[in-house]
Amino acid sequence: MARPPRAWQKMLSGRRLDLLDPTPVDIEIEDIAHGLAFVARWNGQTQGDFAYSVAEHSLLVEQIFGRIAPKAPPGWQLAALLHDAPEYVIGDMISPVKAAVGPGYGELEKRLSSAIHLRFGLPATIPVTVGKQIKKADRVSAWMEATQIAGFDVAEADRFFGRPDPALMSGLSIRLRPPLDARGAYAARTAELLRQMR
């Protein structure tokens, strides 16, 4: 009789994360920060000496979310920072690949996201209004990335991501830095938001 395929991943923290049935106790912020700092956005097809990591993207999305919802409590800011956290184990797939993979990818992402939220004191599913605000911040970030480092012209980015309100981007920029720097910044921001939530 054949063994079922292995569905867990061993993390650097020593945790074993079951991808099909993830539990909050097997999730550590150090693993998330490390994984996201080494996962490249845009399949690595960006300009610069370093890949633009999901950790950097997440930090930018959280900043933009703060402008969209300036009175949001620290918990929803943390939800914005963690919006792509499942990618620390499943990677960052561009939208066309997600569509080709089908609904199974979305279900896996949803299970991981729920466990991550519970691990850090958030509800398994965040309110729809907050989710829409985070998605808006995500699209603004994608527009910035597309036009600044991913080779899109403005008209093309407008078509795919929508033209963002310039006030949401004012003074913000795309950061390209070594993965260990991005990892440290992501972990530090998470720790700060968790302190604020106490």
Image: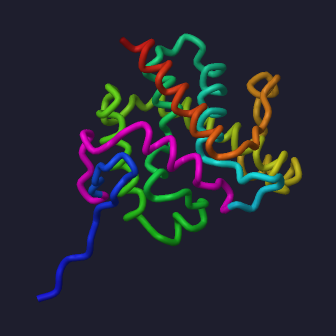
Is 35 inside the magenta-drawn segment? yes
Q: Residue at x 76, y 43 (%)?
A: 176
| Magenta region, main secondary structure | helix
- Horizontal and vertical percent position of residue 6: 27, 70
Question: Which span of residues is magenta-colored?
Answer: 19-43
- Give percent across and percent down for residue 157: 79, 50
Residue 121 in percent (x, y) is at 32, 25
Q: Quadrant of residue 122?
A: top left
127 sits to left or right of 66? left
Asked which quadrant contains residue 171, the reply is: top right
Question: What residue is rendered at 61% in x and 20% in y?
Answer: 66
Above-or-below relation of 40 to 66: below
State the count of labels. 0
In the rendered view, tell whether residue 131 sits above or below residue 153.
above
Q: Is residue 140 above or below residue 172?
A: below
- State whether residue 18 is above or below residue 3: above
- Judged left or right of residue 2, residue 139 is right
171 or 136, nearer to the observer: 171
Q: Residue furthest left?
A: 1
**Quarter of the image that includes the N terminus:** bottom left
Residue 128 in the magenta stretch? The answer is no
Q: Is the C terminus in the top left, top right, bottom left or bottom right quadrant?
A: top left
Q: Which residue is found at the position 73% from the left and 42% from the top? A: 177
> Residue 125, image x and y in percent?
34, 35
Query: 6 or 85: nearer the eye?
Result: 6
| Residue at left offset 51%, top offset 23% | 77
Please identify the quarter of the rendering in which residue 26 is found. Answer: top left
Left or right, 134 with reference to 51: left
Picture colour scheme: rainbow
